[in-house]
Amino acid sequence: MTIRTSEENAELHARITRLFDEQICFNQFLGFKVQSLDPAPIIISFSMRPELVGHFLYGRLHGGVISSVLDVAGGLAIMMGIADYFEQDKAEQVLQRFATLATIDLRVDYLRQGIGESFLASSEVVRLGKRVGVTRSTLTNDEGELIATGNASYIVS
């Protein structure tokens, strides 16, 4: 069994980043950008825009955007967990393994109003099994305040 080289790993990270940043239109629309894939936790950033406001009087982030970024971050963490587990696979093989990845359940705890200029979502794998993966995610604003947490489970096979 041969482990991916650092060059192959860099290619895989670049392809996963391109997939999330450019090919998933939903992520593009919300302005999500991958900031870090390795080492864990993965980090996604985005900036506040008028289209993301959920309460027009206070200008706070819509709860749907909060839950979406926590779900996207969790899914990305699971992808990286799968990539690490199948460290002998080439980039194309790893990307094909993501075909069945889907959210089973997502629990979001909204802790503060989504106020800020920019936001960071981070996520780590809690458990990765053969069929189900579980993540823990957080969302903070540009002042480092914890806005929300999320726990999610994903189908991986």
Image (spheres, rainbow, N blue to C red):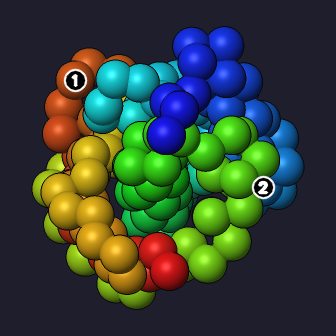
Relative to residue 103, is residue 149 depicted above or below? above
92 sits left or right of 53 in the view: right
Relative to residue 117, is residue 83 depicted above or below? below
Q: Residue furthest front?
A: 1
Residue 147: x percent and y percent? 24, 46
Amino acid at circle 1: Gly
Q: Which residue is mark 2?
A: 24
Q: Which residue is mark 1?
A: 144
Relative to residue 33, is residue 114 depicted above or below? below
Evaluate whether residue 103 shows in this view: no
Q: Nearer the viewer, residue 144 or 137?
A: 137
Q: Give the residue at x 57% y 28%.
A: 4
Q: Secondary structure at mark 1?
A: loop
117 sits left or right of 132 in the view: right
Q: Give the residue at x 75% y 35%.
A: 15
Q: Give the residue at x 66% y 13%.
A: 7
**Which of label 1 and label 2 is nearer to you?**
2
The answer for how far apart the CA atoms under marks 1 and 2 are is 27 Å
Residue 116: x percent and y percent? 39, 31
Residue 46: x percent and y percent? 56, 34
Q: Residue furthest top?
A: 7
Q: Residue furthest bottom?
A: 104
Amino acid at circle 2: Ile
Q: Give the residue at x 26% y 20%.
A: 143
Relative to residue 6, is residue 140 depicted above or below? below
49 sits left or right of 63 in the view: right
Mark 2 surroundings within 10 Å by alpha-carbon count, few (fewer than 14), some (14 through 19), many (20 or more):
few
